[in-house]
Every structure is written in C-alpha cells, then in structure tokens.
Amino acid sequence: GEDVEQSLFLSVREGDSSVINCTYTDSSSTYLYWYKQEPGAGLQLLTYIFSNMDMKQDQRLTVLLNKKDKHLSLRIADTQTGDSAIYFCAERSFSGGYNKLIFGAGTRLAVHP
Amino acid sequence: KAGVTQTPRYLIKTRGQQVTLSCSPISGHRSVSWYQQTPGQGLQFLFEYFSETQRNKGNFPGRFSGRQFSNSRSEMNVSTLELGDSALYLCASSLAGREMGGYTFGSGTRLTVV
C-alpha cells in the first residue's frame, strides 16, 4: 500500500542544523518532495528529488534519499526562526495510470533562540 | 506570474447545505488537483482534472465532486455537508500532472461546517 511516515515534532536551537526524516512504502515512486506549511497558509514546495538520485542540495537545504531503505531526509543548515513551520514529505504515486501525491503527517519544526 | 488562486479563503456552512469552492491555476497549467487537510486524517487526495476531464479520484464519497472549465479553472462541490467535512481544501496546479517537479499549491479554502 501507499504510506508515508514522519516523526511529528522536532525542536532545534537557532543556528543549528535540522534533520527531518521520512519513510515511504511505494518503491515505484518517481519523485519525492518536501513541502513547508506556515500557519494559515497553503503548501510551499521547498525541493524535490528524482528517485534515481541520492542527494540534492539547494542553498541551505540538502535532501538525502536511500532508495533501498525507502528513507528520505531533509537537512536545513543554519536553522532560523523563520524556518519554524510544518514540513511535509510526499511521494508521487502512480496510481490508476495517473499521478497523485501521498503525504506524511508532517513534522512540526520549532526553532528556539 | 500569478500563483494558484483559491476562493473564498474562509467559509462557514450549516450541516446539510452544499458548498462550491473555486481554484484558478497558474496560467498555462492544465492539471488541477484537490486535497483535503484535516487534523485527524492529514492531507488526502480528492481528485485531479486535466483538460476538463477527471482522470484520477481519491477515496471520498460521491458527495464530493468537481469539474474543470475550458480555461482550466476548477470547482469542487460538496453536497449534504457533514461536520467531518470541516477542513482546509487545497488546490494544486501543474502543467500536465506528470512532468518533472512539484505541484504548486494555493493558500486553500478553510471550510467550517456547524
């Protein structure tokens, strides 16, 4: 079946690195995504990785993909208070011939001074 | 370029009523997907429209329906509202739904059923 799991909460000190982890079950997923949601807002696409890649770096963001273990992580370097939000991992599932996103429950990141 | 526009932003309805939500995708995008977000169930896929045709549907009752117009704008309708339909409804647009990259989401419509 299709399932994406994330830890629910992460607290870090400002300036430290944050690492948010995610596991997924659909081995046929072609793309995996990280979205950010701030209070009262929609989902903001942060980054994505194609399933044949191991790593992708985009400024302060680093995505690591272990396809064998179906494990995805998002590392945020030099975490700032503005990074406080809920982070969703999602896999693009190819179901019934067309794509849809399967989301994890979201990890709430709290950044404290 | 303008992002994904969802209207209205907030809505309060009574049980048993029906509601229509609107989504205007990014110009040139032909695929519109709808998702429901609740504290209990998280983000769940409702349906996807492409070129005025529904081509994928999630596991929701028939009370949830949608359509897409020739200009790619989409509406979703929920009939006979239940308290459990209270949620943030998010719309996402993409060029064709299969291309590289992610989907761009709107800010959502927050529906409260009382």
Image: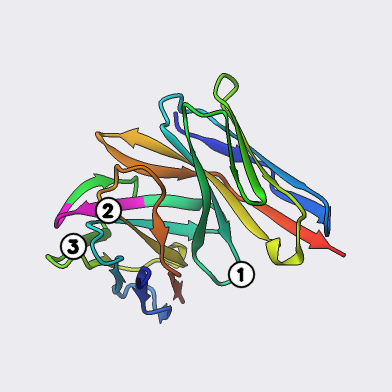
> What's the distance in space between the residues labelled 1 and 3, CA to CA?
29 Å
The residue carrying mark 2 is: B95
Outermost left residue? B70
Mark 1 lies on a secondary structure that is loop
Q: Is residue B57 visible?
A: yes
The residue carrying mark 3 is: B68
Q: Is residue A55 above or below residue B51?
A: above
The residue carrying mark 1 is: A39
Q: Is residue A10 above or below residue B86?
A: above
Residue type at numbered disc 3: Gln
**Which color mode does the image show?**
rainbow
- The chain containing the residue under callout 1 comes to A
Other residues around mark 1 within 10 Å, as few (<14) / some (14–19) / many (≥20): few
The question of residue A49 being in magenta is answered with no
Q: Which residues are magenta?
A: B46-53
Q: Are marks 1 and 2 on the same chain?
A: no
Tell me the tag on residue A94: none
> What residue is rendered at 54% in x and 37% in y?
A4
- The chain containing the residue under callout 2 comes to B
Check the picture and name the quadrant holding the N terminus of chain A. Answer: top left
Dividing the picture into quadrants, the one containing residue B35 is bottom left
The total of numbered circles placed on residues is: 3
Residue type at numbered disc 2: Leu
